[in-house]
Amino acid sequence: MHCFPCFSSPKNKKSSTTNETNDNNEPKPDDRRRAEETEEIEQSEGTSLKIFTFRELATATKNFRQECLLGEGGFGRVYKGTLKSTGQVVAVKQLDKHGLHGNKEFQAEVLSLGQLDHPNLVKLIGYCADGDQRLLVYDYISGGSLQDHLHEPKADSDPMDWTTRMQIAYAAAQGLDYLHDKANPPVIYRDLKASNILLDDDFSPKLSGFGLHKLGPGTGDKMMALSSRVMGTYGYSAPEYTRGGNLTLKSDVYSFWCCVGLTLSRVEELLDTTRAN
């Protein structure tokens, strides 16, 4: 890997849409629209994203109840849900809908995210674009975040051993290297931090939250202003980014090594995320 020499390597099924018919046996307008969107997804090379209705995701998350809330951030809230049709447990990110992209722009960005496929990235399963609702559906990662394991471990769990910590750091580097060197176009993470590194039951890390700045509020000049706004987390963000807004792939590398420092040392005081400078 180009960015991480010391971590050098040793070595869906598409959803179907059933059209309801009116008295003339013609598809309803909403069904025609949904069928067109499905066709657009199917014609997009390298993706197998499913299109969900808002009702499906509301049912999955018990109408977005507080008990299903996993967390929230600058782009919206994330809920744990169970798809009624398959029983699959998923994470549903409900994006802040104020000033979101139009449907075409949103779909284009989602399709780009849907082409990203790596064992150390949280997989995007599908999306919803009903009316002004914009939601993303991801695989649910059950093990919590790296932040949780380092600083808020369960009382009955043992601390992670040195080998596990090294494996997490190495695999996270693999995921970031994919975003930087394999994705086309390259993806700048912007906000890589311990709470965005999720762990499965085997402590295999999955990077989450990447690429979302393109799905944020605004279009045109507003979108350009959003892109230039500092969106990282103090303590993890590179100084040239927090002070001057200079964002490059190297900014992610800085954030990555902050995560590595936390992972290998387990010293929370290494980063003071409450300070602005």
Image (cartoon, grey):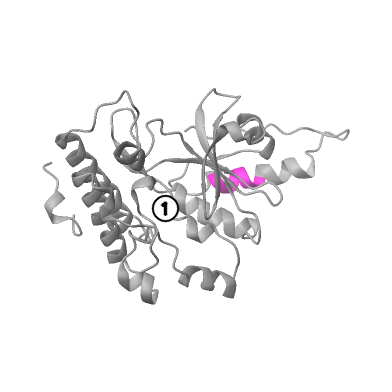
* Magenta-drawn stretch contains 53: no
Residue plotted at (20% across, 59% down): 3
Q: For the C terminus, which image quadrant? A: bottom left
Residue 153 lies, with reference to residue 130, above or below; the image says above
Residue 17 lies, with reference to residue 222, above or below; the image says above
**Residue 53, x across and y down, in percent:** 66, 38
The amino acid sitting under disc 1 is: Phe
Q: Quadrant of residue 93?
A: top right
Residue plotted at (35% across, 52% down): 193
Residue 151 lies, with reference to residue 257, above or below; the image says above
Magenta stretch? 36-41
**Residue 192, x across and y down, in percent:** 35, 54
Residue plotted at (81% across, 38% down): 26
* Residue 23 or residue 113, whichever sits in front: 113
**Residue 261, x across and y down, in percent:** 21, 51
Give the overall secondary structure of the magenta segment.
helix
* Magenta-drawn stretch contains 37: yes
* Residue 46 or residue 267, whichever sits in front: 267
Q: Within 10 Å of the Cα at label 1, are there few (<14), some (14-19), or many (20+) other Cα atoms?
A: some
Q: Which residue position is annotated with label 1?
A: 210
